[in-house]
Image (tube, helix red, strand yellow):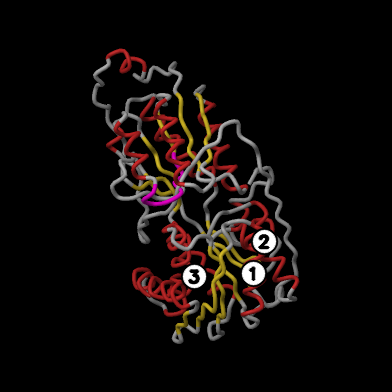
Amino acid sequence: MKNLKKVMAVLCVGMMAFSIAGCSSTSTQDKSSETKKQESSETAAPKTDDTQTADKSGSGDEKFRIGIQMKTLDSGFFVTLADEFTSRIEDYGWEAAVLNADSDTMKESENMDSFISQGYDLIIIDPYETEGCVEAINRAADAGIPVICVDNSCGDSANVVSIVYPSNVKNGLLCGSWTAANRFEKDEWINSVCMGGQKDLEAARERRMGFIAGVLMERLSISEDEAVELGTAMEKEVIEKGSAVNDDARFKVGGIGWGAYTSNGGLDAAEDLVVANPDMNLMFGENDAMILGAMTAIENAGLSEQVVLAADADGQKEALELIKKGTNYACTGNNQPGATAEAAVAIAREILAEGADPGSYDRITLTNPACINIDNVDEYYDPDSAF
């Protein structure tokens, strides 16, 4: 492994207070080999209330109310995501209200009912649980309120306009493949550990599996589909047994820690992983916040020259700064909040202001995946970004 500079990362996540408490839930369904785009929509069917139809005819002067249901606001990513939604909605002169579920399905359901009872025109939800959000989403749809799911997925029976998020699998594949090709010699064993965010979350599984599959794809010179099949089995073994090895790829995942997507959680989990895996030379994780927190544990153990760090989300500014400096922070996946907010609010505008049919969209709308590394980081880095 190439020599790496010694770095200490300090992550300070700014939190903000919101005037109304709220909710959201989790997970994703993904296609690893293609990015689906939202379809252009057609005029919505007339409503029984002629006055209501006229109010939403898309003249450009209407004042719409959009509810934003966040699963949590406990990290900079989610705070920034909520801010991105709010600013784009308010740019149209519309009203945006943010509610926070505090990682609680019951609170999420109550907040959805609040939006429904108050007659909001559209709801954007970042779900806390894949299936736990379905009934609340369908209550809104039954009340005639379109629901756009973002960041994570929802159950197949949820009546949503579209599910908007980055391709977790593709981001993972790109980051895993790039790391294996650029930070390790071809015949060198990769002794890795994984920093997980949430065990039973589909989006989390996709990120873990995607990175593992990317390493296997690079090391075994196999197709993407073959790598996903092998990566799925290897990730499952890691979850069930705590570790997994592919001898042909000279690749081991020696352990997994759970950091709950926060910097402090990443630090705590990394301390245990460092003790249990002194020979590790790679730590990969589901988001930047956990890996940034884990850097302190790596530093304290004197392993900064030994351990490569990689995330497959989110493109956080502090991570990009470390990548730019050529440190042991190798790469991250493109999951910047602005891209998700831009795509979701564009759909909302088409429905509310232009009369598009909510049923005309692809179920999944993916933002552009990318492995952000030292070769392309300047394309994504914004020193003025809030996240």
Look at the numbered discs 3 and 2 and tell me whether their residues touch, using CB distance below 8 Å: no
| Distance from the alpha carbon under mark 1 to that under mark 3 | 23 Å
Q: How crowded is mark 2: few (under 14 residues within 10 Å), some or many (20 or more)?
A: many
Can you tell which quarter of the image residue 87 is in? top right
Kind of element beneath mark 3: helix
Write down the residue under mark 1.
Answer: 270
Seen from the viewer's position, the closer of residues 160 and 92 is 160
Residue type at mark 1 is: Ala
Kind of element beneath mark 1: helix
Q: Where is residue 186 in the image (x, y as percent from the top left)?
A: 53, 82
Is tag 3's residue or tag 2's residue first in the polypeptide sequence?
A: 3
The question of residue 158 being in magenta is answered with no
Residue 171 in view, yes or no: yes
Can you tell which quarter of the image residue 225 is in? bottom left
Mark 1 or 3: in front is: 1
Write down the residue under mark 2.
Answer: 293
Q: What range is drawn magenta here?
A: 125-132
Residue type at mark 3 is: Ser
Find residue 177 and name its label: 3
Is tag 2's residue or tag 1's residue first in the polypeptide sequence?
A: 1
Kind of element beneath mark 2: helix
Residue type at mark 2 is: Gly
Residue 374 in view, yes or no: no
Look at the numbered discs 2 and 1 and tell me whether their residues touch, using CB distance below 8 Å: yes
| Distance from the alpha carbon under mark 2 to that under mark 1 | 8 Å
Mark 3 or 2: in front is: 2
Q: Position of residue 159 (x, y in %)?
A: 30, 41
Q: In this view, does 248 lie above or below 23?
A: below
Q: Which residue is drawn at 41% across and 33% down?
A: 113
